[in-house]
Image (tube, rainbow, N blue to C red):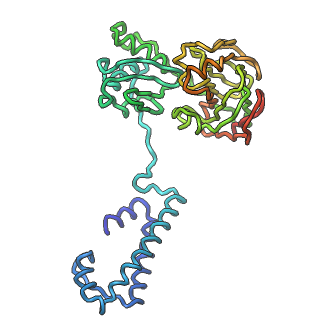
Amino acid sequence: TEPLEFSFLFVAPILYVLHVLLAGTSFLVMHLLDVKIGMTFSGGFIDYILYGLLNWDRTHALYVIPVGIVYAIIYYFLFTFVIKHMNLKTPGREDEVAETRDTSVERLPFDVLDAMGGKDNVKHLDACITRLRVEVLDKAKVDVNALKELGAAGVLEVGNNMQAIFGPKSDQIKHDMALIMKGEITSPSQTTVSEEDEAVHIDGSRSVTIVAPCDGEVIPLSEVPDQVFSGGMMGDGVGFIPRQSEIVAPFHGKVKALFPTKHAIGIESTDGVELLIHIGIDTVKLNGEGFESFVKVGDEVAEGQLLMKVDLEYLQQHAPSIVTPMIVTNLGERQIEVEDVKEVEKGQRVFTVL
């Protein structure tokens, strides 16, 4: 048992202390039950048979089995409780260290293309405001770890389709990758991917109320039928099932991003909350059909101001889902408190950033 005991000593000494106490009581229990089993070296299974079971009437070796089962249960539940309660970093529970590759933003499209297996492995390129979508010929050639090192918040695999979550710069990466594959971009200095703006921090002096951008049903983010949102890769928030066509501003702020296909809009509040409203699932493939925008990037908007109109009937016929996630993308150490509501109207509070 030395390997286990040494792991306790170096990784979680408190577990070794518990182990010593439990082992000591187990010897006491065996003594009280008059269990006498000899051993040669390790006290293993062979010793148990030779010096215990073969003379069970004198050694009382059968008591080892029920006592061992009881102690196994005690060890399991006691150690599990202590490990979780004290957040002990036992093997397999270490904090993940997110390593990022030392690469320039200009080289990013080249490096992402290499991670996808090179241009000869790419069958089709696409992107939206949340992710880069690449259909590859051979999925085995894709280096998922490299994509994460390059800044992808996550990588999803759907058949031979790879989805790398690079956020708003996904479309720029896709654009440059396409030009690299055509030979129109041959050096990093020609790429268009820009450095991200300095991270915006939410005003920590007060909570921020977020209201519904549409009439409809509110669902937990975990029920949004898209793993990028339900898995929290882009941030935290809620989902809506819209009942009517109008999408309005959920607070006073400025339009920071509006995807060309108009299916997604990013807004920043005066308190620094960055919010993404993504209308429907996989609606980037509709190429703007069914969407009418009433704002542009840089516009100041007031709470309740009309942002866009959506043809819900068209979306229901041509998109996988009309579920519309609304997420805070720069929570940092903050968290949200969701209201206990099912049906909402525009302007009704749905969650608060604490």
Q: Residue at x 72, y 16 (%)?
A: 300
Quarter holding the N terminus?
Answer: bottom left
Q: Residue at x 37, y 34 (%)?
A: 145
> Above or below — where is 51 with respect to 2?
below
Tell which residue pokes out farthest to the top in this image: 184
> Above or below — where is 18 with respect to 231?
below
Q: Residue at x 56, y 20 (%)?
A: 318
Task: Indicate the quadrant where residue 260 lies.
Answer: top right
> Going by the image, does 321 lie left or right of 140?
right
Task: Indicate the quadrant where residue 286 lies.
Answer: top right
Percent x, y of residue 144: 37, 32
Percent x, y of residue 305: 76, 18
> Above or below — where is 185 with respect to 87?
above
Choose between 323 and 10: the one closer to the eye: 323
Choose between 242 and 87: the one closer to the eye: 242
> Going by the image, does 296 lie left or right of 252?
left
Residue 181 in view in this figure: yes
Percent x, y of residue 311: 65, 17
Quarter holding the C terminus?
Answer: top right
Percent x, y of residue 27: 39, 82
Residue 17 in view in this figure: no
Q: Residue at x 29, y 18 (%)?
A: 120
